[in-house]
Image (cartoon, rainbow, N blue to C red):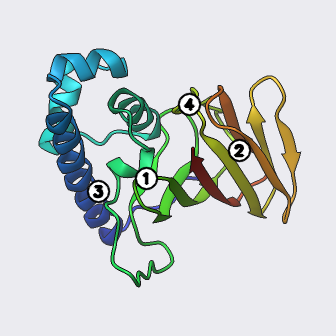
Amino acid sequence: MPEAITDAETHDAAQLRARVAASVRELRSRSGRSLADVATAAGIGKSTLHAIEAGDANPGIETLWSLARALGVPFGALLDAPGPTVRVVRHGHGPQVASEASTMRAHLLATTGHASRAELYHLRLQPGPVGDSDGHTAGTVEHVLVTAGRLRAGPVDRPVELDVGDLATFPGDDRHRYEALEDGTTAVLMLEYR
């Protein structure tokens, strides 16, 4: 059963749209590329990219990954700028994005600097449609630690089943999947960009 969306989540979604809009505009502008060029490279429509940059679209994980690959930046660069020295992210807060094809929701918890980057996410998944993810930028490694429930994760041709406390590490630059095997599955995901 889908969870009810609160006023706080609606506000957070609006803030995320604004942050993504500003990040995508800035990164595209800095690269000197046109809307059409980036949209084509990301495999999305020019009007979709325009709506994202205007803050009028609610892109899912798959669209944001495609944009990150097209812009040559880590996924988290579209969600959150590097923060202050001490940063607290309260439970349930922070940039959140939902999958377009599956039940996964990801909260960005932390990122590191731009030279060598790692991103930390809290994932919530439910059994249901499985959306395989295209590979991310070359050299990306994913580390997933199950904190509740059971999860099948890894490259699409060799996923592994994980229980609470199990950690799997696999290449994130190959096509891969996350599939909840129980209600209320949660995990911590660290993306490492090399």
Mark 1 / mark 2, whichever is N-terminal: 1
Helix, strand or loop at disc 3? helix
Mark 2 / mark 3, whichever is N-terminal: 3
Disc 4 residue type (three-letter) = Ala
Q: Is residue 91 above or below residue 142?
A: below
Mark 3 / mark 4, whichever is N-terminal: 3
Pointer 1 with pointer 3, Cβ within 8 A: no
**Disc 1/disc 3 C-alpha distance (Å):** 24 Å
**Disc 4/disc 1 C-alpha distance (Å):** 15 Å
Q: What label does residue 127 carry, if any? A: 2
Q: Is residue 169 left or right of residue 61?
A: right
Task: Say which residue appears at 56% left-offset and 61% top-offset.
Answer: 120
Q: Is residue 165 visible?
A: yes
Mark 4 / mark 2, whichever is N-terminal: 2
Q: Nearer the viewer, mark 4 or mark 1?
A: 1
Q: What label does residue 138 carry, if any? A: 4
Pointer 4 with pointer 2, Cβ within 8 A: no
Residue 82, position as x, y percentages in the image: 35, 65
Disc 2 residue type (three-letter) = Pro
Helix, strand or loop at disc 4? loop
Helix, strand or loop at disc 2? loop
Task: Say which residue appears at 82% left-offset and 34% top-offset.
Answer: 159
Residue 179, position as x, y percentages in the image: 72, 41
Query: Residue 53 lies in what quarter of the image?
Result: top left
Q: What label does residue 16 carry, if any? A: 3
**Disc 3/disc 4 C-alpha distance (Å):** 26 Å
Q: What label does residue 115 carry, if any? A: 1
Disc 1 residue type (three-letter) = Ala
